[in-house]
Image (spheres, helix red, strand yellow):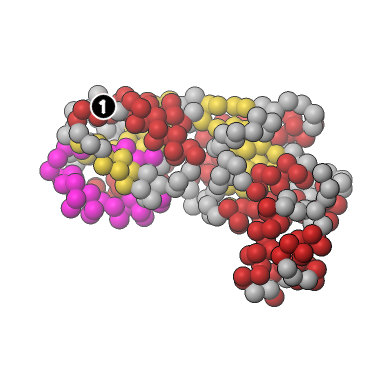
């Protein structure tokens, strides 16, 4: 495959070579419409700037780039803790950054990491198939995906069996004697979709329709959802169970329920997902699906180091088994 040049990008975008150069070096000097057009073409055409390609050929830096989706989510912080533990034992440093769930930002971060000559990259991608992953493959830099199951069998990854996790939650919820079940989901991500699929596969639908609230992403979102649950679903009157696919959100919901003196779990049972460290330390310990978060980071880091040492080795695909942890929020 012929290498895409800066002239190819300029021609496709209908701009000058100098304009494309400014997008790379001084993007603030290019109007947003032109800048976005050029960046989109770079992604589509798998363009790698010369300085990125040169960086790949240099001496090892003992730096590893780590890109996660969210720095304010304890799930991703605990993944990073697992990564850092392994890298520290092998005298590597970690460059940590967050895509904030924005695909274009993720692409630019990864491109910058390659340019800064990191030895390898660990990525928790926004999407399982994306221009960022194509860039990593095209650049030839060792990388491992986390919290994602790509279709490409040539890519190493470490993730959790989220379908199974959703099924575990459903089986447990079926055993609770509640009048209604409410599903609360956040980001539209592959892992979240798998949790929902597993849940719907096994939940008892004979108890009535399951109300679903989407886009509830943060602790604050969970806290703010409670008045809506009170007005629309009468959770203070109907005995309810909430399955919340993110522990951060579940903790926010419980904080507001406690503030309103709504009994947990007598009136409302709460089931989360992730088993972040705080889930066992909050005032009402949270029942949740555990997915060995720090193990995900540790295994991904070890696989990346192995891949760096043996670039021609076969890709490794790890799907970690979830466990169900019962605590005071549901019984």
Residue depicted at 35% across the width and 48% down the height: 214
Q: Residue at x 38, y 51 (%)?
A: 215
Q: Which residue is mark 1?
A: 204
**Magenta-colored stretch includes residue 60:** no
Q: Label 1: how many residues lie within 10 Å, few (<14), some (14-19) or many (20+)?
A: some
Identify the residue shown where x is 60% and y is 33%. Answer: 151
Residue 268, quarter of the rendered image: top left
Name the spot of residue 57 as percent of width and height, x first.
87, 46
From this view, report whether residue 173 is shown above or below residue 60: above
Q: Nearer the viewer, residue 172 or 190?
A: 190
Q: Left of 153 or right of it: where is 190?
A: left
Please tell me whether residue 33 is drawn above or below residue 113 in the rendered image.
Answer: below
Decide if residue 90 is on the left or right side of residue 195: right
Question: Could you tell whether 295 is left or right of 58 in the image?
Answer: left
Of residues 79 and 36, the one nearer the viewer is 36
- Tell me which segment is drawn in magenta: 217-245
Depth order, front residue of 106/41: 41
Q: Can you say whether 314 is above or below 14 in the image?
A: above
Query: What's the residue at 59%, 35% (across, down)?
Result: 150
Tell which of 16 and 206 is nearer to you: 16
The location of residue 235, given as percent across then percent down, is 18, 44
**Residue 235 can be seen in this image:** yes
Q: Residue 26 appears at what percent x and percent y?
A: 73, 70
Measured as percent of width and height from the top left, residue 161 is found at 49, 28
Callout count: 1
In the drawing, does residue 209 fall left or right of residue 246? left
Q: Quadrant of residue 192?
A: top left
């Amino acid at each position: 495959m012929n290498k895409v040049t800066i002239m190819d990008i300029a021609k496709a975008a209908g701009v000058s070579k100098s304009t494309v150069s400014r997008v790379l070096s001084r993007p603030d000097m290019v109007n947003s419409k032109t800048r976005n057009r050029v960046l989109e073409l770079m992604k589509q055409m798998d363009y790698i700037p010369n300085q990125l390609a040169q960086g790949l050929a240099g001496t090892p830096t003992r730096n590893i780039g780590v890109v996660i989706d969210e720095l304010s989510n304890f799930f991703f912080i605990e993944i990073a803790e697992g990564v850092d533990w392994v890298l520290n034992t092998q005298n590597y440093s970690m460059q940590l950054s967050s895509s904030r769930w924005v695909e274009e930002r993720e692409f630019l971060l990864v491109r910058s990491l390659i340019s800064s000559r990191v030895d390898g990259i660990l990525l928790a991608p926004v999407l399982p198939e994306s221009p960022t992953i194509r860039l990593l493959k095209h650049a030839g830099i060792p990388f491992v995906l986390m919290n994602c199951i790509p279709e490409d069998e040539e890519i190493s990854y470490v993730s959790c069996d989220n379908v199974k996790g959703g099924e575990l939650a459903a089986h447990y919820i079926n055993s609770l004697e509640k009048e209604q079940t409410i599903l609360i989901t956040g980001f539209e991500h592959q892992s979240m979709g798998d949790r929902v699929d597993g849940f719907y596969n096994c939940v008892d639908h004979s108890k009535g329709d399951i109300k679903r609230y989407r886009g509830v992403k943060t602790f604050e979102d969970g806290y703010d959802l409670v008045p809506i649950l009170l007005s629309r679903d009468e959770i203070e009157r109907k005995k309810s169970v909430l399955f919340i696919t993110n522990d951060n959100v579940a903790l926010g919901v419980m904080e507001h329920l406690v503030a309103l003196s709504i009994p947990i779990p007598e009136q409302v049972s709460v089931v989360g997902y992730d088993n972040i460290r705080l889930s066992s330390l909050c005032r009402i310990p949270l029942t949740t699906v555990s997915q060995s978060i720090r193990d995900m980071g540790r295994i991904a880091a070890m696989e990346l180091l192995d891949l760096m040492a043996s670039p021609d080795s076969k890709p490794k695909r790890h799907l970690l088994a979830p466990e169900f942890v019962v605590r005071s929020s549901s019984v």
